[in-house]
Image: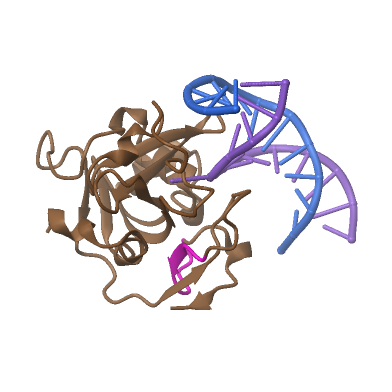
Chain colours: A brown, B blue, C purple
Amino acid sequence: MPLPRDFFDLPTPELAKALLGRTLTFGPCAGIIVETEAYLFRDDPACHAGRGRTARNAAMFGPPGDVYVYLIYGMYHCLNIVAGPKGEGEAVLIRALQPTEGIPLMEARRKTQKPENLCGGPGRLTQALGITGALNGTDLFDRPGPELGIGIRRDGIDGPEIQSSCRIGLSGGKDLQLRFFISGNRFVSGKKVGHPMDD
DNA sequence: CCAACGATGGTCT
DNA sequence: GACCATCGTTGGC
């Protein structure tokens, strides 16, 4: 079952937690979301939308459930789900998946067979699923076909135990506890930072 | 195991 | 020209 449109109306940090344990699909590949980060419009120096709308971040100002994809370090794409009230410019970064479907294709794209390295990181999971900037500004609901396009299903891990920590790879906003992940899941990235506080 | 570093290109000042 | 919401490799322990 795809998640309903109003599922994405939760406050952004709540949505970041609610997405954990759900299944992200793209084409023949799928995985369970095990790690996310929230980016807020207010008082968040790391948020791309924080200093106004530009060509790059325009998709962040769309309605919740839209997709925001950007290129980082000239070679990797990062996948976000737009959140918050429309126009606020908030989003949830998808940081890691537990691969469940289309694993041979992921292995070919990632050039590795090590399960933790297929989707364990924001750049890795987009590479494994074949997600590029072409998806920027699309949404999770209007699909070209039943098994095409990007979507999020309800099935996966029920009632996961969630932990939080500071976010990864930032210069500003390090004090905010806006990274969320499923406790003990081996596919979570950045285990160095995994010193969390409970939720 | 882990720290350091370079690749690589779009975006913004 | 500086800055990245990253990752793979390298070289040390």
Q: Residue B7 at x, y = what percent?
A: 66, 25
Q: Residue A84 at x, y = what percent?
A: 29, 54
In the image, residue A81 sits, relative to residue B9, either above or below, namely: below
> In what quadrant of the picture does the C terminus of chain A appear?
bottom left
Task: Please name the residue shown 41% across and 29% down the image.
Answer: A54
Which residues fall within the magenta stretch? A177-187
Q: Is residue A178 magenta?
A: yes
The image quadrant that residue C9 belongs to is: top right
User: Residue B13 or A143: which is nearer the viewer?
Assistant: B13
In the image, residue B6 sits, relative to residue A68, either above or below, namely: above
Locate residue A174 relative to residue A17 in the image: left or right: right
User: Residue A101 or A3: which is nearer the viewer?
Assistant: A3
User: Residue A12 or A149: which is nearer the viewer?
Assistant: A12
Q: Is residue A173 magenta?
A: no
Task: Please name the residue shown 30% across and 40% down the image.
Answer: A61
Task: Please name the residue shown 49% across and 50% down the image.
Answer: A121
In the image, residue A77 sits, relative to residue A188, either above or below, namely: above
In the image, residue A157 sits, relative to residue A6, either above or below, namely: below
For the question of whether residue A137 can be seen, the reply is yes
For the question of whether residue A2 can be seen, the reply is no
Locate residue A198 relative to residue A30 in the image: left or right: right
Q: Residue A145 at x, y = what percent?
A: 10, 36
Task: Please name the residue shown 49% across and 38% down the image.
Answer: A111
